[in-house]
Amino acid sequence: MLVEPLVEAAKTLAEKRFTVEYPEERESMPDTYRGMLRLDMDTCISCTACEKICPNKTITMVEVKTDKGVKIMPQVGIERCLFCALCEEVCPPKCLTLSKDYSFEAYDKRDLIKRPEELE
Ligand code: SF4
Ligand code: SF4
């Protein structure tokens, strides 16, 4: 009666680990994974399409000083993001994309609001 659980435990010990020593070890995400948004500020045309399409009001356009003057660009409240990728889909120059970065945990909720400069 006791032998069976011991055999199962021994089998489990011999199996490959499924977890990694995060954050020292990072798993690579599949191509279809949708993580932190990234913005190429140089090619953003300030069209506001991303803000308009976002179903959860995650995106707010904010002013950013650039070499060419002040532009409006998306600020993302990532805690509200559904990772639906609609913003990526509508972005004409494809400068707003969802990356494979899943590591954006924060102790303070305010740190989850990412200004355009922080999305680069
Ligand atoms: S992925 Fe979806 S929810 Fe997140 S910012 Fe883009 S449109 Fe909004
Ligand atoms: S849709 Fe793209 S180009 Fe338009 S404001 Fe958003 S990030 Fe910029």
Image: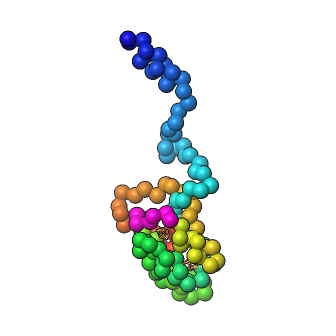
Task: Please give the count of numbered marks on the rendered protein.
Answer: 0
Q: Position of residue 56 (x, y in %)?
A: 41, 71
Q: Residue furthest bottom?
A: 69
Q: Position of residue 111 (x, y in %)?
A: 40, 64
Q: Is residue 68 above or below residue 22?
A: below
Between 68 and 116, the one nearer to me in the picture: 116
Q: Residue at 49%, 46% (x, y): give it.
A: 23
Q: Residue furthest front?
A: 1
Q: Position of residue 113 (x, y in %)?
A: 42, 69
Q: How is the image coloured?
A: rainbow
Q: Which residues are magenta?
A: 78-84
Quadrant the N terminus occupies: top left
Name the image quarter holding residue 98. Answer: bottom right
Is 117 a magenta residue?
Answer: no
Q: Residue at 51%, 39% (x, y): give it.
A: 20
Between 15 and 46, the one nearer to me in the picture: 15
Question: Visible in this render: residue 39?
Answer: no
Q: Residue at 52%, 59% (x, y): give it.
A: 35
Quadrant the C terminus occupies: bottom right
Q: Residue at 46%, 58% (x, y): give it.
A: 104
Between 27 and 115, the one nearer to me in the picture: 27
Q: Is residue 113 above or below residue 50?
A: above
Q: Is residue 111 above or below residue 21?
A: below
Ligand 2 found in image quarter: bottom right
Q: Is residue 16 left or right of residue 79?
A: right
Question: Visible in this render: residue 88?
Answer: yes
Name the image quarter holding residue 109. Answer: bottom left
